[in-house]
Image (cartoon, grey):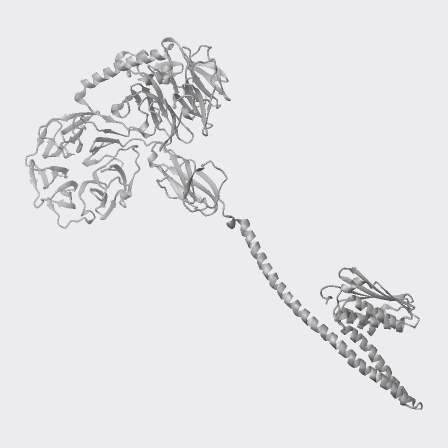
């Protein structure tokens, strides 16, 4: 009983110990009363089980005494217990407690604000949790108790809380005490309207609202309600003017300033005979359909459409106190209990009765509608009448082990058992002639004839006489009236047809010939056949179309025991592993298995032909009792899951690296050997976590999302280098995509030899290598060419040298000999022969002239003359010799030793010497000069100028340009790519300069 001492709502009012002892006494009295009531009513026991999903410590809950619930922005449920806080995401739990930084494990309130903070109210103060960090707010020293029972956030984002029945507001990292009515006030409850307006309940003062930073009375405490302790407040979601007030003794409703009881309650003015719950009220909530839920120390009460349901352990909940009730954003309703964990209410779309008789717990083998529209059940112990959730046995000796029930056109219920029985609602009569038969199924034709399927053939009942068909000693399991006198017969090996009470020998339906037939029904133009191993067959007799549907198409099992059709033409199939709903296209006979809108549907084995559709409900008999489905249930609104990436495992060289990656990592770069990733994700969908599927893709590798899959992890074993973004989204069972798409971006850095810079460098190196090899080849080629040219040049030099020597020795000697011989001849010729002497003189002069001419040729042939310096010195010698002893002064300027390094080809030095020899001859012949100057200069590194000037009489340049001599000189200048510049003034002298380049073409 310790949970009463620890439950936060108990702190409102009397002292803790007084509450504990008084509640313990009250609980013991109530428990004794319940025990007496149960013992006095055991003669009519039944157990109607509602649909709850239960989560407790065996599922991973941190502690079973739960005080509070809250949902965060990612649809995860935070649970506050007396053992700390845990977070439930539909598949697992994350927990933190005092060991993680909380000041105390007793958690009384949790709240998720709009900024993503989790606020935790504990027995020792307030804590804030975000991104794995806990901040504990210091408790003001003037307050001795620090238990925080409620936390809310107003429309402006301010956080308000109740600590030790005092109101506080969060300001930065401090808690600021706020007074509403006075210093000694006791604030017991807080709530915020949809508009974000804060309301507070002050004991003996009433409800106050905060408007424009000022407190104003919203509902004063007056009259009989002056001393009421308000522990919870809730504004109606549909009518914001209606305020529900929870007290330990019941619920009050405030509207337009008036208070009234929602239901009569002890201590709130209700009379004893009208009291609804004689229990201690702990929690209050309004569900998605605006129905009110009240949690008490004796389970929970559910108020709907003027009626109520009390949920306890007997009908699916728990007998432990329901400390908190919470509706999440997906309209799931959660009930927190003190000692049994939490429960999720799955709605009243279907209920089960699995303890119809506390002693025998019968199996439901047949279901039919009686004469007064009551439901009749066939069991191993006989018949039961079901009405208003009560079961009453029909006592009839011999009527046990019921196999099947059938209602005929007159309202009689036919019972298949050891023999056939007819039940009219009052009495049961055994049909004579059937005592030795086990009747498995019934059918009625249009003439009112009752057909019976037995283990030994087919019987029919007409005019109070039982008859058997001829030649029909076969096991028959199912019958279906097709029209007039035609009956379709289901056997252990397919089906056959009876027409006019005769078997049709040629009738065959090959598709089902090897299957045992369990059930058959008609729906419009389709005949649906349930088999033992091949699921369903849909048969259109007119078009002779037969289609088969199995567990591959969505059936829960291939064994289909029972079939029914509701008013919406939905086919209900009871299988070996639960119930399926199907929709048929009656034109094509295509069949679609509908999604299961009945949450938490149990896996029960249906019994053969134990099914009934009546008054918008489907009754199905199972091996564990009766299941009742409401076909008019409004499907819950479709909600979207929230998807998040849970973990990214990184593998390197075949080994996992722990904690390497988190989904929040941005700009992540991985090495080339870290290209094996395993990514796990989760779609948070608390309505039905196991039915969530996923679609994902890895941009950079894939373009389209995958088909929906159930697995929540994907492995990428060998990703090539590149930039990637993993995207995943969740899909609800109804096909609704998650509102968000979870993303995780990363980059696998290529190895250095696959990077761009390395590629560029490698290409550059290859290009440079190619260029280098080409240059080397070209250099070697040029080197070879230069070597060959050098060899050739050297050979030419040798030839020139040898030629010059030979020419000098041979021609010089011969010319000298001619000269000497001519002189000797001149001596021998008589003086009186002047003509002969003149002829000899001419020979001698020509020989001397020829000798002098050969000197130019010999100089040009000599390799020593292949430089500019030697060329200039040779021209200087020609000038000196040309102008000696004739009264003309000759000067040479600018001939420097640096010109020795300027090599010239033989063509250059030959043409240069001939140009200036011709110019000096022209000066001697025509200039009448007194001073002739030869000057050499270098304008720059690549241009040379050699000029010859005189102070003679000059000439007209225009007239002189027509002469052949100057033209020949210019022609020689053009041969060496030079230019001849002529400047002359009559009676002012002449200057002629030769400009030519000194480059590779000039050098020898």
Residue 510 percent location from the top left of the image: 19, 49
Please state if 181 lies on the left or on the right of 16 as rendered: right
Q: Is residue 966 visible?
A: yes
Question: Residue 910 or 796: which is nearer the viewer?
Answer: 796
Coordinates of residue 184 in the picture (x, y in percent): 44, 10
Point out the image quarter for the C terminus.
Answer: bottom right
Between 93 and 283, the one lying in front of the other is 93
Toward which corner of the image does residue 470 lie, by quadrant? top left
**Between 88 and 821, the one nearer to me in the picture:** 821
Question: Is 836 located above or below residue 340 in the figure?
Answer: below
Looking at the image, residue 900 lies above or below residue 540: below
Q: Is residue 378 left or right of residue 697?
A: left
Judge whether 127 appears above or below 365 on screen: above
Give how far across and how far down residue 279 sits, in percent.
30, 16
Give left or right: position of 992 versus 658: right
Q: Residue at x 80, y 80 (%)?
A: 812
Q: Toward the viewer: 969 or 158? A: 969
């Amino acid at each position: 009983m310790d949970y009463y001492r620890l439950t936060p709502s108990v702190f409102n009012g009397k002292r803790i110990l007084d509450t504990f002892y008084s509640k313990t006494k009250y609980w013991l009295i109530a428990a004794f009363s319940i025990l007496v009531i149960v013992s006095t009513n055991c003669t009519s026991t039944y157990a109607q089980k509602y649909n709850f999903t239960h989560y407790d410590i065996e599922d991973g809950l941190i502690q079973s005494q739960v005080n509070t619930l809250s949902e965060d922005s990612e649809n995860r449920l935070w649970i506050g217990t007396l053992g700390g806080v845990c977070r439930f995401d539909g598949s697992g739990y994350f927990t933190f407690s005092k060991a993680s930084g909380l000041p105390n494990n007793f958690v009384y309130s949790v709240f998720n604000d709009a900024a993503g903070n989790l606020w935790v109210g504990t027995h020792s103060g307030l804590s804030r949790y975000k991104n794995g960090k806990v901040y504990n707010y210091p408790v003001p020293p003037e307050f001795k108790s620090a238990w925080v029972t409620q936390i809310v956030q107003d429309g402006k984002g301010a956080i308000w809380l109740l600590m030790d029945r005092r109101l506080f507001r969060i300001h930065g990292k401090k808690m600021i005490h706020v007074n509403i009515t006075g210093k000694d006030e006791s604030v017991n409850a807080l709530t915020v309207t949809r508009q974000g307006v804060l309301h507070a309940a002050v004991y003996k003062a009433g409800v106050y609202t905060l408007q424009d930073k000022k407190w104003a009375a919203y509902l004063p405490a007056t009259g009989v309600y002056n001393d009421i302790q308000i522990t919870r407040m809730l504004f109606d979601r549909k009518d914001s003017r209606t305020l529900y007030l929870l007290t330990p003794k019941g619920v009050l409703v405030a509207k337009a300033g008036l208070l009234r009881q929602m239901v009569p309650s002890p201590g709130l003015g209700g009379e004893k005979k009208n009291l609804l719950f004689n229990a201690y009220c702990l929690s209050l909530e309004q569900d998605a359909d605006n129905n009110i839920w009240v949690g008490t120390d004796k389970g929970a009460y559910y108020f709907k459409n003027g009626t109520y349901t009390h949920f306890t352990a007997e009908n699916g909940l728990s007998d432990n106190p329901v400390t908190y009730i919470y509706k999440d954003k997906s309209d799931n309703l959660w009930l927190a209990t003190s000692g049994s964990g939490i429960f999720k209410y799955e709605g009243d779309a279907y209920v089960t009765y699995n303890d119809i008789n506390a002693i025998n717990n019968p199996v439901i083998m047949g279901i039919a509608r009686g004469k007064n529209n009551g439901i009749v059940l066939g069991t191993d112990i006989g018949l039961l009448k079901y009405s208003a959730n009560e079961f009453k046995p029909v006592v009839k000796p011999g009527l046990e082990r019921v196999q099947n029930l059938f209602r005929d056109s007159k309202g009689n219920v036919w019972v298949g058992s050891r023999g056939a029985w007819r039940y009219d609602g009052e009495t049961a009569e055994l049909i004579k002639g059937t005592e030795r038969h086990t009747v498995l199924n019934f059918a009625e034709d249009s003439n009112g004839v009752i057909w019976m399927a037995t283990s030994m053939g087919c019987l029919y009942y007409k005019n109070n006489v039982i008859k058997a068909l001829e030649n029909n000693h076969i096991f028959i399991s199912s019958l279906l009236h097709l029209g007039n006198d035609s009956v379709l017969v289901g056997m252990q090996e397919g089906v056959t047809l009876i027409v006019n009470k005769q078997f049709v020998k040629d009738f065959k339906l090959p598709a089902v010939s090897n299957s045992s037939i369990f059930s058959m029904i008609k729906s419009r133009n389709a005949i649906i056949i349930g088999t033992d191993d091949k699921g369903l067959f849909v048969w259109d007799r007119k078009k002779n179309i037969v289609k088969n549907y199995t567990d591959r198409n969505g059936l829960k099992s291939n064994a289909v025991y029972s079939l029914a059709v509701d008013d919406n033409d939905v086919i209900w199939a009871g299988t070996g592993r639960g119930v399926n709903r199907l929709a048929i296209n009656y034109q094509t006979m295509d069949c679609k298995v509908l999604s299961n809108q009945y949450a938490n549907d149990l896996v029960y084995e249906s019994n053969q032909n134990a099914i009934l559709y009546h008054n918008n409900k489907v009754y199905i008999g199972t091996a564990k009792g009766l299941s009742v489905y409401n076909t008019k249930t409004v499907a819950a609104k479709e909600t979207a899951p929230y998807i998040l990436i849970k973990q990214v495992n990184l593998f390197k060289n075949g080994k996992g690296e722990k904690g390497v990656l988190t989904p929040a990592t941005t700009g992540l770069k991985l090495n080339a050997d870290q290209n094996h990733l395993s990514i796990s994700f989760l779609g948070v969908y608390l309505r039905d976590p196991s039915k969530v599927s996923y679609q994902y893709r890895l941009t950079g590798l894939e373009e389209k999302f995958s088909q929906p899959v159930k697995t929540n992890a994907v492995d990428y074993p060998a990703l090539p280098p590149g930039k990637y973004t993993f995207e995943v989204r969740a899909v609800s069972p109804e096909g609704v995509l998650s509102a968000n798409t979870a993303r995780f971006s990363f980059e696998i850095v290529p190895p250095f030899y696959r990077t761009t810079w390395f590629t560029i460098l490698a290409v550059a190196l290859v290009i440079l290598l190619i260029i280098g090899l080409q240059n080397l080849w070209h250099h070697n080629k040029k080197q070879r060419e230069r070597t060959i040219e050098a060899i050739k040049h050297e050979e030419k030099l040798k030839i020139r040298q040898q030629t010059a020597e030979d020419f000098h020795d041979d021609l010089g000697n011969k010319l000298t000999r001619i000269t000497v011989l001519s002189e000797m001849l001149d001596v021998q010729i008589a003086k009186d022969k002047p003509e002969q002497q003149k002829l000899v003189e001419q020979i001698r002069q020509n020989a001397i002239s020829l000798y002098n001419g050969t000197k130019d040729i010999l100089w040009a042939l000599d390799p020593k003359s292949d430089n500019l310096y030697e060329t200039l010195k040779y021209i200087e010698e020609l000038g000196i010799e040309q102008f000696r002893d004739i009264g003309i002064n000759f000067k040479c300027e600018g001939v420097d030793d640096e010109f020795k390094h300027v090599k010239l080809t033989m063509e250059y030095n030959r043409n240069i010497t001939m140009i200036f020899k011709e110019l000096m001859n022209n000066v001697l012949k025509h200039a009448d000069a007194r001073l002739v100057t030869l000057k050499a200069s270098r304008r720059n590194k690549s241009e040379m100028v050699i000029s010859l000037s005189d102070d003679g009489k000059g000439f007209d340049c225009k007239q002189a340009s027509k002469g052949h001599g100057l033209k020949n000189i210019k022609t020689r200048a053009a041969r060496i790519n030079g230019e001849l510049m002529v400047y002359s003034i009559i009676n002012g002298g002449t200057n002629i300069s030769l400009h030519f380049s000194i480059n590779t073409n000039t050098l020898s």
